[in-house]
Amino acid sequence: MSDVLGWFFAITAFGALLILGSLILHAVPRILATLALITTLAAIAAAIPH
């Protein structure tokens, strides 16, 4: 019985890691785009004479 529970937890943890990994991979382009936008805005703000 403990073997079955061990396998169940191992498979569940592996599945959760896969889901989490795919979510992170899908989020990376958005994160990079947001960082690029912030950097661009900061560069424009720094270029404008105050």
Image (cartoon, rainbow, N blue to C red):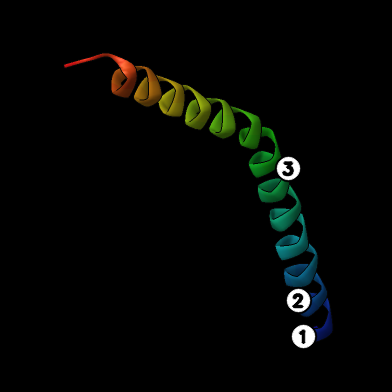
Q: Contact, CB < 8 Å: mark 1 with mark 3?
A: no
Measured along the vertical axis of the image, is residue 47 above or below residue 19? Answer: above
Q: Nearer the viewer, residue 43 or 19?
A: 43
Residue on which the image places disc 3: 22
- Residue 26 position within the rendered picture, expressed as x and y whole percent measured from the top left: 68, 33
Separation (CA) of disc 1 from disc 3? 30 Å
Looking at marks 3 and 2 on the same chain, the residue that comes earlier in the sequence is marked by: 2
> What residue occupies the far left of the structure in this picture?
50
Q: Pointer 1: residues within 10 angstroms few (<14), some, or many (20+)?
A: few
Q: Nearer the viewer, residue 32 or 42?
A: 42
Label 1 sits on a secondary structure element that is: helix
Q: Is residue 29 left or right of residue 15?
A: left
Q: Which mark is residue 43?
A: none
The type of residue carrying mark 1 is Ser
Quarter of the figure that contains the C terminus: top left
Residue on which the image places disc 1: 2
Q: Nearer the viewer, residue 49 or 24?
A: 49
Residue occupying the point 72% across, 70% down: 9
- Residue 41 position within the rendered picture, expressed as x and y whole percent measured from the top left: 38, 20
Residue on which the image places disc 2: 5
The type of residue carrying mark 2 is Leu
Q: Is residue 25 left or right of residue 35?
A: right
Separation (CA) of disc 2 from disc 1? 5 Å
